[in-house]
Image (cartoon, rainbow, N blue to C red):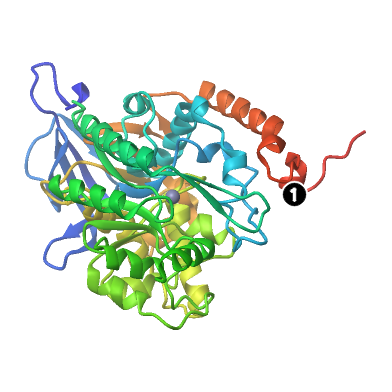
């Protein structure tokens, strides 16, 4: 428990926010969020003790809730903050023309800013996340030195999701992908990831948990996937694995096994409620695959496996899930992650709604409630934290205060629609994690990213200088990713 939640006598501090215009509250009877008007919200220490009209008790801290909306903190179940921020300006419209439009194989290895800048990238990402109302982040990455230390000062709640694999992919010609796999090393890295995760979970703040998982379906052996799954089950945790994330990977798994990625996961025993599938877009019935022979969707539904949906990064390359409503209506738990920059969950929510509707050609294919639930209580359940993602008595005090006075929020017939479709993070005024305020008036309270931005700029300059050395065709940066307009030399 943070010290600023206690008063001088060491007792737990109680805070009440009275007469909130709106509260997005949890209704246990319907297992759904509901709107409350003119209601009170109180928390003691890190725990919510009242959500509803007329808080009867006293409190050391009294706030006026008129002119604000309280909503649960977002749970971001899939992101890579240790490198993604370094790619700003370079990857927004970059894909491989001959590798299914993905950027994974030809460009990711070229643009990587490297571990030297991971902490700075991470802090920049966290600053964006907190200010867009994210209170829990899942950071999927290969373990790095003092990973926990990147998080300590920030105040965000974090799942450090230690990824392991047998090796990386590469292309030497821009049209075929090779894998440098060392399975013995991969087996060792699996054990290391489990150890790193277990150690992270011991952090005394109570804000950090360690999970682990096989990084990608095409870079891990069956033994590594099942080994991780069994170890995760012993700990009551899920694994997360990238799968069905590109056409190249779909074809690669078919080439190796004769199965689609979903069929293969089922065949080895890895498709089930303890598995979170990162992206899970390319099921055999995705209309852009033309692969009618299969039953991936039904297998997924019956297995109880869960999906981490990251719509923005795929929309950049013309790729989308088919569709959010189809998955959710069939009972597949779908959470939302930012994956890339901007680290802004409200952007993801809006894109989830628009992309689903465009893919289906139907305005009903991605309702706002599905996206908002995915980003809150469904995501929380996926990471086995039913005390997060909802404003209910007994849950953790992880929430945002939205300024209803922001012009983008008005008129306010439906305040969630106002923030998702109009106001975005501009209206998020204050954010609390575990009962402790981390953002006030849109500003970070516990850390500063000025130096991190400088380092990130340096990291990007390094990439620009050396990109040609890593590119299969030896291209300079301007050729790899031309600017929107050329710089005119005087
Ligand atoms: Zn990812």
Residue 136 x, y percent position in the rendering: 31, 42
> Mark 1 packing: few (<14 Cα in 10 Å), some, or many (20+)?
few
Residue at 23% x, 69% y is 303
56 in relation to 273, above or below: above
Question: Is residue 86 at least partly visible in the picture?
Answer: yes
Residue with the most extreme bottom position: 292
Q: 112 or 472, which lies in front?
A: 472
Q: Is residue 213 left or right of residue 258?
A: left
Q: Is residue 435 left or right of residue 254?
A: left
**Quarter of the image where one finds residue 218:** bottom left
Q: 395 or 289, which lies in front?
A: 289
Element type at marker 1? loop
Q: Which residue is mark 1?
A: 484
Residue at 68% x, 31% y is 466
CB at mark 1 closer than 8 A to ligand 1? no
Residue with the most extreme top position: 8
**Quarter of the image where one finds residue 461:** top right
């Amino acid at each position: 428990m943070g010290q600023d939640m206690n008063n001088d006598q060491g007792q737990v501090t109680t805070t009440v926010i009275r007469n909130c215009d709106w509260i997005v509250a949890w209704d246990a009877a319907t297992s759904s969020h509901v709107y409350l008007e003119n209601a009170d919200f109180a928390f003691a220490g890190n725990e919510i003790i009242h959500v509803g009209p007329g808080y009867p008790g006293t409190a050391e801290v009294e706030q006026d809730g008129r002119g604000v909306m309280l909503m649960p903190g977002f749970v971001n179940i899939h992101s890579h903050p240790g490198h993604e921020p370094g790619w700003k300006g370079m990857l927004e419209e970059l894909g491989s023309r001959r590798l299914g439009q993905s950027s994974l194989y030809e460009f990711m290895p070229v643009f990587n800013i490297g571990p030297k800048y991971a902490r700075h990238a991470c802090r920049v990402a966290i600053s964006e996340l907190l200010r867009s109302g994210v209170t829990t982040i899942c950071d999927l990455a290969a373990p790095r030195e003092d990973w926990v230390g990147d998080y300590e000062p920030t105040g965000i709640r974090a799942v450090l999701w230690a990824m392991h694999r047998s090796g990386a992919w590469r292309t030497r010609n821009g049209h075929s992908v090779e894998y440098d796999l060392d399975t013995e090393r991969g087996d060792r890295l699996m054990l290391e990831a489990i150890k790193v995760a277990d150690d992270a979970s011991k952090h005394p703040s109570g804000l950090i948990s360690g999970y682990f998982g096989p990084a990608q379906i095409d870079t891990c052996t069956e033994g590594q996937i099942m080994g991780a799954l069994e170890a995760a089950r012993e700990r009551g945790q899920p694994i997360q694995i990238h799968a069905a994330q590109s056409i190249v990977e779909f074809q690669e798994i078919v080439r190796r096994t004769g199965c689609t990625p979903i069929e293969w996961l089922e065949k080895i025993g890895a498709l089930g409620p303890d598995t979170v599938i990162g992206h899970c877009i390319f099921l055999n019935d995705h209309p852009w695959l033309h692969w009618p022979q299969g039953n991936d969707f039904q297998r997924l539904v019956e297995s109880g496996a869960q999906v981490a949906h990251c719509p923005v990064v795929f929309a950049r390359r013309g790729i989308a899930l088919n569709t959010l409503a189809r998955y959710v209506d069939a009972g597949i738990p779908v959470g939302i992650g930012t994956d890339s920059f901007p680290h802004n969950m409200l952007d993801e929510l809006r894109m989830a709604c628009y992309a689903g509707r465009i893919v289906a050609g139907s305005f009903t294919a991605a309702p706002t409630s599905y996206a908002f639930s995915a980003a809150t209580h469904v995501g929380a359940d996926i990471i086995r934290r039913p005390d997060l993602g909802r404003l209910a008595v007994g849950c953790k005090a992880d929430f945002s205060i939205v300024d209803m006075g922001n012009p983008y929020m008005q008129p306010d017939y439906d305040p969630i629609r106002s923030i998702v479709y109009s106001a975005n993070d501009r209206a998020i005024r204050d954010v609390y994690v575990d009962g402790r305020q981390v953002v006030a008036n849109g500003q970070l309270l516990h850390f500063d990213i000025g130096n991190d931005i400088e380092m990130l700029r340096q990291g990007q300059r390094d990439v620009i200088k050396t990109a040609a050395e890593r590119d299969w065709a030896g291209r300079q940066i301007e050729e790899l990713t031309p600017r929107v307009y050329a710089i005119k030399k005087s």
